[in-house]
Amino acid sequence: MELIFEDEEKKKDRHILREIIIWIICLALSVLAGYLVITYAVEKTTVIGESMEPTMSEGEKIIVNKLAYKFMSIKRDDVIVFKKENSFGTYYDIKRVIALPGDSILIKKGKIYVNGEEYTENLKVEEINNPGLAAEEIKLSDDEYFVLGDNRNKSEDSRFASVALIKREDIAGKAWIRLKPFGFVSQLNRKDDKEQENAESQGNAKEKETENAQATDKTQATDKTQAADKAQAADKTQKTDK
């Protein structure tokens, strides 16, 4: 009986020991998985400042997709998270990509021009008052990105030397999800169909106005030239008659 009792106690001890080992392994795997996710997959960060309003406001929590650009390229209009440094250390900043490596960019009279063509956005943003460094055309190298904040007139971005062009190696990932209020960052602050149509109509109307103004100027110039030619011809005729 005593031997049977001792065997049962040993079995019980082994069972408890096995459960403890399994628990330790599961805990270690959970910690490792968490570390891998935070290091290589996703990360949470906080919006600093008002430069991305109304898309994102100060203090809002954002999930960063750190794997996005491992499998796809960065595109215009992407909202990226990148590393910046100040006297206090390194932190994350958030801005929208406007121009890509190899592009040229110019901001003139509130309008953005990429590679010589006006850049249109499906966003609710103000016209730019201060073009900063982009008042003169900037040519991006093969690892540089030009970014702007959505709050165009209250944003420190690639227009200014304090931020300048963003290097590929400093980009941590793509701003993916706003936690509260919940929303996918790529869908925030978009114009609806009517607003987009109105914006396009206004753009077309301005183009037509410009074309009409140019045509009027040409017509007036032609009329003046013709009038001058007629006056000269009249003068010559009068001189000949004399």
Image (cartoon, rainbow, N blue to C red):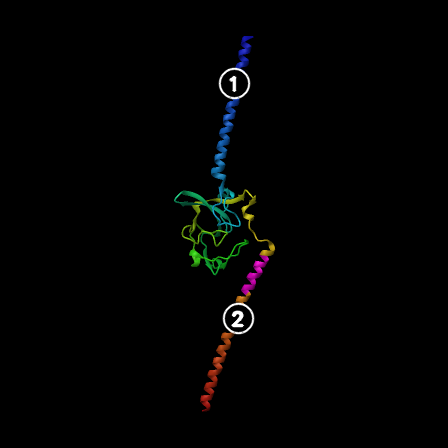
Seen from the viewer's position, the closer of residues 234 and 213 is 213
How dense is the environment of label 1, judged by Cα within 10 Å: few (below 14), some, or many (20 and up)? Answer: few
Residue 223, percent across and down?
Answer: 51, 77
Vertical arrangement, residue 168 with respect to residue 200, above or below: above
Q: Main secondary structure of the magenta part?
A: helix
Residue drawn at x 47%, y 84% as measured from the top left: 233
Which quadrant is home to the N terminus? top right
Mark 2 or mark 1, which has the lower sequence index? 1
Vertical arrangement, residue 8 with respect to residue 209, above or below: above
In magenta, the rendered stretch is: 196-207
Residue that carries the numbered disc 2 in the rendered image: 215
- Asked whether residue 202 is in view, the answer is yes
Residue 165, percent across and down?
Answer: 43, 51
Amino acid at circle 2 = Ala
Residue that carries the numbered disc 1 in the rendered image: 14
Is disc 2 placed on a helix, strand or loop?
helix
Question: For the image shown, how many numbered marks are present on the structure?
Answer: 2
CA gap between label 2 and label 1 equals 95 Å
Residue drawn at x 48%, y 83% as measured from the top left: 231
Is disc 1 placed on a helix, strand or loop?
helix
Would you say the residues marked 2 and 1 are in contact, meaning their CB atoms lie under 8 Å apart? Answer: no
